[in-house]
Image (cartoon, rainbow, N blue to C red):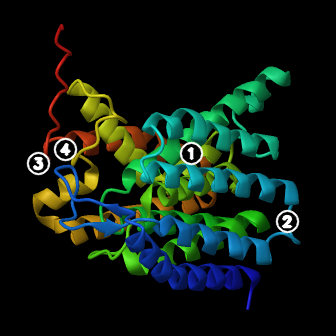
Amino acid sequence: MSSSLLTFCVALLASVSLTWPVRALALRYGMVDQPGPRKVHLKPMPLLGGIAIYLGFVLAILVFAVRENPQQQIAGILCGATLLAGVGLLDDRGLLHHQVKLFIGMPVAALFLLAAGIRAQFFSEFVPGGFGVLLDGLLTIVWVVGITASFSILDHMDGICAGIAATAATFFTISAMLNGQTLVRTLGAASVGAALGFLLWNFNPAKIFMGDGGAMMLGFLMATLGLKVRPDHVQFPLTWLVPVLILAVPIFDTTLVTISRSRRGLLPFASPGKDHTAHRLANSGFGCRGAVLLLYFVGAVSGSLALLIGRIPPMMAGILAAALLPLAFFAALALERFPYERQAKPKPPTAA
């Protein structure tokens, strides 16, 4: 049995078995998500599922990754994941302002990656010297914050965040296997196992939610895998098309709600509501399960396209890249016409 399969199995078994006691702990101490006008669930749901995801991932990594891979990079990844899991837990408990995780927690997690030698490689390809490296460092922070935040707001319907993370991690793992990237393969396998183990409890009808700690940690891991994946036979800058395609669903959903809320005079990350892609699909006849399964399918299709990038002529890959933006634009335009619940625009403060 390969090390990747063993990593997957350990993470899966640990996550699925730890979710039950974590659920009982959440119920005992009142860590529940109450239903409300901006929520889909109709009864209080225990949180803290992110603890099971975190422990499943960390256990698998400590058992199988420490000896065979760069320990400095593993330490940086585990520090970032631990920080965001802890910040998310405090946020779920109502002990932190929501802007702390966006403007402090996520950037600091990105700095852990930079300190470990994990960074984007974009500007340094054509900007010589330290200035290119500096720009890549800034791009790393933007990428990590963006992808982590996208998974944080993606956790709005049963099974969607864990399932999309498991789908993306699967394609990162396959890409790593095809290109001989041992660390990415191990990280991906552990992420798939931890997410799937929790998904068995979280798919509709969910018995537990992962909370912001689990969502941010999964987003951070997906951002890290996106920085680490290095597909062979793919010319720069098409190399960036691979992680973007694998993470197409959360990137598209975040872009859609950002544009839609901004157009309505709302602050995108401070105005939660039922206007995500899954909400619009559910309201259009797919239902909650159907909407989530459809997004799984879209994630699998875009992930499959990512694997093809290195196996088709560069000109065809360029045509595919050029077609993505108008395709995404028309998809967003169509979804904006789908039914969704519109948030009320905040009223300006009245004079005393």
| Mark 1 surroundings: few (<14), some (14-19) or many (≥20) residues within 10 A | few
Q: Which mark is residue 69?
A: 2
Q: Which residue is mark 3?
A: 339
Q: Quadrant of the N terminus?
A: bottom right
- Three-letter residue code for mark 2: Asn
Residue at 37%, 72% in the rendered image: 208
Within the image, what quadrant is residue 201 found in? bottom left
The image quarter in which residue 283 lies: bottom left
Is 110 above or below relative to 218? above
Q: Amino acid at mark 1?
A: Met
For the point 11% across and 64% down, the residue is: 285
In this rendering, position of residue 56 left or right of residue 96:
right
At a point 73% along the width and 71% down the height, the residue shown is 61
Residue tagged by mark 4?
334
Q: CA gap, disc 4 to disc 2?
A: 45 Å
| Disc on the earlier residue, 4 or 3 | 4
